[in-house]
Amino acid sequence: MPAPSASSPALAPASRGWPADLAGSSDAIRLARDRVVKAASREGGVLVVADRGFDVDAIAREVHARGPGESGPFAALDCAVPETAEVERALLGSTTVPGGRRARAEALETLGTSALVATTSGGTLLLASIAELPASAQARLARILRDREARIDGPDGSQPTRLSLRIVATTRPPVESDVDEGRLRPELYRRLSAVRIDVPALARRREDIPAIARQIVRDVSEARGIAARPFTQAALALLAALPWDGNVHELRAAIEGLSASAPGPAIRVEDVLGQVRLDARHGALGPQASLREARRQFEREYIAAVLRHYEGRMGPAARVLGIQRTNLYRKARQLGIPRRKAAE
C-alpha cells in the first residue's frame, strides 16, 4: 500500500492563486471555488466529486491552505488499494470498540496512536476514492465525524480526545450511484457532503480552458526556470474546442509537450496541431490518401473545432481563422460542415 503523505504548505492563504484544476470564470467553477473557501473555514466532512483527470490532491491541499489551520498537518490516503485491512489500520488503527452492535454504535471510537485520523488532528486528511474504503471503516469514520472526538490509545489507557479535523473525501460522479448500490454508506455520505465540491468536466466548461492553459504554462515554466510563453488567440480557440476526455491531466500533458517543442516566442495554432489530434472520431487517413485529401480533412476538422468553440458564430470564428466571414461561409459549405455549426 502506498505510504500516506504529510506536509504543510508554505504559502499563506491570502497569497495563493488557484491551481489549474480550479482556474477559469465559468459559473460552475466559481461555485466550486466558493465551496473550497467554505470548506476551508470549517471542520468536519468535505466531499470532492471530480471525474478522472483532475488533481484531487491539489484541490484538497487548496482547502487545507486556505483554512485557519493551514499550518497543521496534511495527510493523504488512497482507499482504492487491494490491501483493505492495511487501509483501515492506517486510517483508524487496529483497535475496535468491544461489545455488540448497539454498544459500538453508542460508544466513542477508539483509535491507535498512529492512526491518521489521530495524527492529522488540527489539519486535513485526504481520503481518495472514498467508496473503496471497507464498509466497517466507513461506519467507524461516520461515527468519528458525528462525535468529533474519539478515544486514543496510550500508555495510560485510552482517553476521550477532541478531534479538530477536516476530512476531504473524493469520488467520481455520479456519487449517488455509489450510495444506491451500497459502495458508500448513507450515513458517511451525509457527514462528508456537509460541504460538497463538484468539479465539472472540461467539456462542460470550455470557456475555462484558455485560463487553465495559461495557468499550466506558468506552472511548467516556473518549474523549469524559464519565462512563460503566451498563446496566440487561434491556439487558445483550438485548445478550447478539443474534447479533452482526460480533463486537466490530458491538457497538462499536451501543454508540457508544447512548452518543450514549440519553436517561437508564442505558442501558435500550428504548434497545437503538431501536438494533438483534432478529432479522433474521423480517424487517421490511410496510407493511400493523397496530400489533397489529408489537407481537406485537416482543414475541415480545424474549422469545425473553431466553430464549435464560438458556438457557430461566424464573425468571431472568421477573425480567429484570419479569413473573411463570407469566405468562412463558403469554406463551411465546401467542406461539408453542417450548417447548424455555422449558424449565427
Image (cartoon, rainbow, N blue to C red):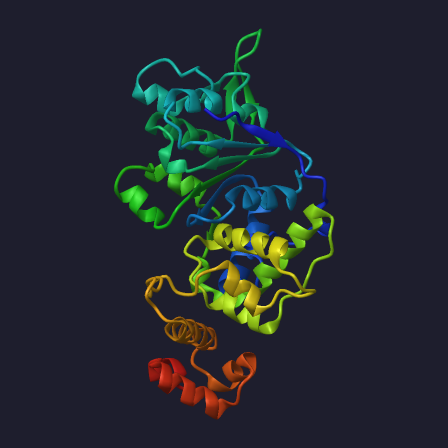
In the image as oriented, which residue stretches furthest toward the left? 181
Residue 1 as seen in the image, left or right of residue 218: left
Can residue 26 be seen in this snapshot?
A: no
Question: Residue at left 39%, top 65%?
Answer: 279
Residue 45's spot in the image, x, y percent?
49, 40
Q: Nearer the viewer, residue 307 or 154?
A: 307
Residue 57's spot in the image, x, y percent?
54, 41
Can residue 181 be seen in this snapshot?
A: yes
In the image as oriented, which residue stretches furthest toward the bottom? 326
Is 299 rendered above or below residue 143?
A: below
Q: Tell me which corner region of the image, top left, top right, bottom left or bottom right, holds residue 229.
A: bottom right
Q: Nearer the viewer, residue 167 or 174?
A: 174
Count of labels shown? 0
Question: Residue at left 65%, top 61%?
Answer: 263
Question: Residue at left 57%, top 53%?
Answer: 257
- Quadrant where the C terminus is found in the figure: bottom left
Q: Nearer the viewer, residue 29 or 319?
A: 319
Residue 319 as seen in the image, left or right of residue 299: right
Is 264 rendered above or below residue 187?
A: below
Residue 200's spot in the image, x, y percent?
45, 57
Is 126 rendered above or below residue 95?
A: below
Residue 201's spot in the image, x, y percent?
44, 57
- Quadrant where the N terminus is found in the figure: top left
Q: Tell me which corner region of the image, top left, top right, bottom left or bottom right, holds residue 60.
A: top right
In the image as oriented, which residue stretches furthest toward the top? 155
Residue 70 as seen in the image, left or right of residue 254: right
Is 280 rendered above or below residue 14?
A: below
